Amino acid sequence: MKDPSPDDLLPIGDEHWDSQNNGLKHSPGSSPPDAMAAAMPLSTSTDVRVGCFARLAQVTNLLGRTMRNLYEPTPDMAYNQEEATQLKRTLEAYSTLLPVEATASDCRYYCAPISICLQ
């Protein structure tokens, strides 16, 4: 299965999802409400606040890339090592960020992304 593109959109923020499901629906063919415009790309930096489901999507993508690096390496060993180092640094950044974000909102929603980072 193909990995998602860095430009693929993350799930919209939780507050936007909640407001969309509370009456901000739009009819087919019309412009989506502002809540839908809040979708960010998968490559969104950790310094940009997104919802917990979006964070789960980001760290799950990193997990998939890590698994591919381990079990389907490229013939270029230097590239594989460089990618592994970058993935490790990125997961460490998320493992620092996610507990902070969890304390700023309902922490039970951050258990899955935190556990993925710590594995």
Image: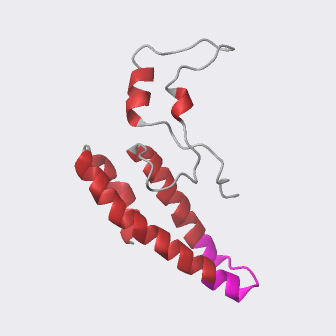
Q: Quadrant of residue 76?
A: bottom right
Q: Which residue does the image show at 26% across and 44% down from the upper left? A: 105
The N terminus - image quarter: bottom right
Q: Which residue does the image show at 64% across and 54% down from the upper left? A: 6
Q: Which residue does the image show at 39% across and 72% down from the upper left? A: 119
**Residue 10 left/right relative to 96:** right
**Residue 103 left/right relative to 15:** left
**On screen, 100 above or below 29?**
below
Q: Quadrant of residue 33?
A: top right
Foreground pick, 10 / 66? 10
> Looking at this rendering, what residue extends furthest in the bottom direction?
77
Residue 93 point in image, percent of width and height: 41, 67
103 within the magenta span: no
Residue 64 point in image, percent of width and height: 57, 64
* Residues shaded magenta: 67-81
Residue 2 point in image, percent of width and height: 70, 57
Magenta part, dominant SS = helix
Q: Which residue does the image show at 50% across and 55% down from the upper left? A: 45
80 within the magenta span: yes
Residue 26 point in image, percent of width and height: 56, 14
**On screen, 8 above or below 34?**
below
